[in-house]
C-alpha cells in the first residue's frame, strides 16, 4: 500500500517532467547539443585509439621478452598457421657444448633420436 501511495505522489511529478519536449529548444541550443555530442564521440574515439596503441606497445614488449626466452633456450615458435619455426639456440656460457637439449623431444622418440644424430653429425663433421 505504501508503494502505491509513493508512486501516486511521485508519478505526478514525473509525468510533468516527461511532458516537456526537446522540440521547444531553439536552433542555437540544438546546434550546441549536436556540437557537444560530436565532441563527446570524438573523445571516445580518441580514447579508444589511445587504448589500442597502448595495448599494441605492451604486446610488442611481451613478444620481445618471449623471443629472448625462446632464443636463450632454443624453443620453437609456432607460426600463425600452426607451423613450427625452428630457432637455433644460443650457446650458453655455462654449457660445455651447444647441442640442443633432447629432453623436450621425449614424446616422439624417433624424432628425438634423429635430432640427436643430426646434432652429433654437426659437431663431428657428418662422419659417424
Image (cartoon, rainbow, N blue to C red):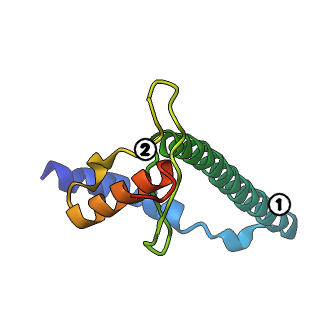
Reading the image, the residue beneath label 1 is: 32
Q: Secondary structure at mark 1?
A: helix
Q: Nearer the viewer, residue 48 or 21?
A: 48
**Circle 2 Cα neighbour tier, 10 Å, few/some/many (<14 / 14–19 / ≥20):** some
Residue 57 on image: x %, y %: 65, 46
Q: CA distance from mark 2 to mark 1?
A: 72 Å
Q: Position of residue 73 (x, y in %)?
A: 45, 41
Residue at coordinates 48% horizontally, 59% vertically from top-left?
126
For the C terminus, which image quadrant? bottom left
Q: Is residue 23 visible?
A: yes
Q: Is residue 2 left or right of residue 59?
A: left
Give left or right: position of 9 versus 3. Answer: right
Horizontal and vertical percent for residue 83? 45, 72
Q: How many marks on residues?
A: 2
**Numbered badge on residue 99:** 2
Q: In this orientation, which residue lies closer to the viewer: 34 or 86?
A: 86
> Where in the figure is residue 74, as x and y percent of width and height?
46, 47
The disc, 2 or 1, on the residue closer to the chain's N-terminal end is: 1
Is residue 8 positioned above or below 59 on the image?
below
At x 67% / y 56%, what residue is drawn?
Answer: 44
Disc 2 secondary structure class: loop
**Residue at x-position 55% and y-position 46%:** 67
Q: Nearer the viewer, mark 2 or mark 1?
A: 2
For image coordinates 60% across by 66% down, the residue present is: 20
In this view, the residue in front, 70 or 2, is 70
Amino acid at each position: 500500500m505504501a508503494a502505491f501511495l509513493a508512486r501516486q505522489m511521485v508519478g505526478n511529478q514525473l509525468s510533468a517532467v516527461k511532458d516537456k519536449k526537446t522540440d521547444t529548444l531553439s536552433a542555437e541550443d540544438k546546434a550546441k547539443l549536436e556540437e557537444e555530442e560530436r565532441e563527446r564521440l570524438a573523445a571516445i574515439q580518441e580514447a579508444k585509439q589511445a587504448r589500442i596503441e597502448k595495448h599494441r606497445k605492451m604486446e610488442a614488449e611481451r613478444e620481445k621478452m618471449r623471443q629472448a626466452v625462446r632464443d636463450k633456450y632454443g624453443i620453437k615458435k609456432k607460426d600463425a598457421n600452426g607451423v613450427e619455426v625452428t630457432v637455433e639456440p644460443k650457446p650458453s656460457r655455462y654449457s660445455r657444448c651447444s647441442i640442443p637439449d633432447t629432453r623436450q623431444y621425449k614424446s616422439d622418440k624417433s624424432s628425438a633420436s634423429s635430432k640427436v644424430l643430426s646434432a652429433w653429425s654437426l659437431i663431428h663433421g657428418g662422419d659417424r
